[in-house]
Image: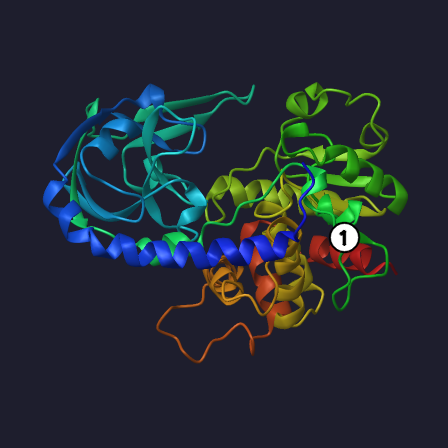
Amino acid sequence: MKKTVSKFVMLCVMFVLFAKMGYARQAFAAENAAKAGTLKATAKAEDIQKYGNVVLSLTGEKIKAAGYEYGDVVKVKFLGKTLKVPFISNYSDVDTGKPALVVRAGDPYALLAVNMGDFATTYGIAVKTVHEDNTIEWNYAEGVKGPVSFKISLKKAGGYYDEYVLHQLKASNERTDYPDLTDEQYANFRMIKTTGIGEGVLYRTSSPINPKNNRNTYADAAIKAAGVDVIVNLADDEETARGYENFDSSYYATTKFITLNMPVAFSSGEFQKKLAKGLKYIAATPGTYAIHCTEGKDRAGFASAILECLMGASYDEVIDDYMTTFYNYYGVTKDDPRYEAIVKSNIAKTLKTAFTFKSKDKKRDLATADLAACAKKYLQKIGLTNAEIKALKKNLSGK
């Protein structure tokens, strides 16, 4: 049914309701602390997911029945390690690179995961092998005997609740739920117009072929209208891309495209190697470009930011482009109290890591840094030669 109030107003109302719920949560936090019991679980290497999420032999129902609530902080003990992590409902409920105990709607079992990272590798549980046919195999790390045992106990009831509320950004996959957006905005499609990038040279978008979020047909129409003829697909391998319904009849199928099947772990060697391959493709292939992942938000957001920095964009330009996605999906505007929190916990944090900024080095700040030099150094680090960087800049400038 078509909504009678704007998406933005609805989100504001939800934010207020979440805040009120926080007071109630705090009121019975002590009661839950007394109720919550210690939980035990195991995990097997063969059940580790593609991106390193560790599947526990523990259902979400059992965790909640033991007295735990989303927003609690728990202690997780395994392999001689003790982590203090939040109990949450999705990976994105924590900042980039942070671990968590996750129970998602529709998933029967709990996961230990790192947002945009790899829990199994990070914490020495298992080692991933990617075979030539793109199948993935996990084996226990050296010295680890499976199955791995985990002990979970409550650290602080409601200790992460405020942050959890902040991360509750919900998007709809129904076009009618976004009456104030154009079809291009709904597809999270736009030309990148930051300093140094030529007019009509580089676009970013949600997937024009993956129907998962009901935006593919809008995105495909947008890249056709823009004259895009070279595409960097960060999300899929070629078999998956060509296997989507109606791929053969899409405009996308007529373009030159490269498929990279990148993980959402920005600091991993696999991510960097595949990103380098995609950027080398742009450097070697003149044309009008589009970059996409699935939503056009995380992987595409980072890749776009790196290119914007390289071409001379200011910090404010990079942030404005990145946060346009959060308006298109969630209605978050600059005056929204969540805006700066999203910037800080997502793109700013990721760029600081990529550019090797130290948390204690207060003299180095993204707003005042030479972002072009930082981006060039990053590209050299992940494998681009100076000649390839020069060609990349020439093609993106449109000259």
Question: Which residue is drawn at the image coordinates 71% and 52% (left, top)?
Answer: 388
Q: Specify whether 224 is left or right of 14.
A: right
Q: Residue furthest front?
A: 4
Could you tell me the amino acid type at mark 1? Arg
Q: Residue furthest left?
A: 34
Asked if one can make out residue 24 in the rendered structure from this viewpoint, the answer is yes
State whether residue 239 is above or below residue 383.
above
Residue 336 in the image: state x and y as whole percent.
Answer: 55, 65
Q: Specify whether 378 is left or right of 147.
A: right
State whether residue 316 is above or below residue 90.
below
Question: Which residue is drawn at the image coordinates 89% and 43% (left, top)?
Answer: 225
Q: Nearer the viewer, residue 328 or 67?
A: 67
The colour scheme is rainbow
Residue 113 in the image: state x and y as whole percent.
Answer: 36, 39
Q: Quadrant of the N terminus?
A: top right
Question: Which residue is drawn at the image coordinates 51% and 38% (left, top)?
Answer: 263
Q: Specify whether 150 is left or right of 312.
A: left
Q: Which residue is mark 1?
A: 190
Q: Specify whether 195 is left or right of 136.
A: right
Asked if one can make out residue 229 in the rendered structure from this viewpoint, the answer is no
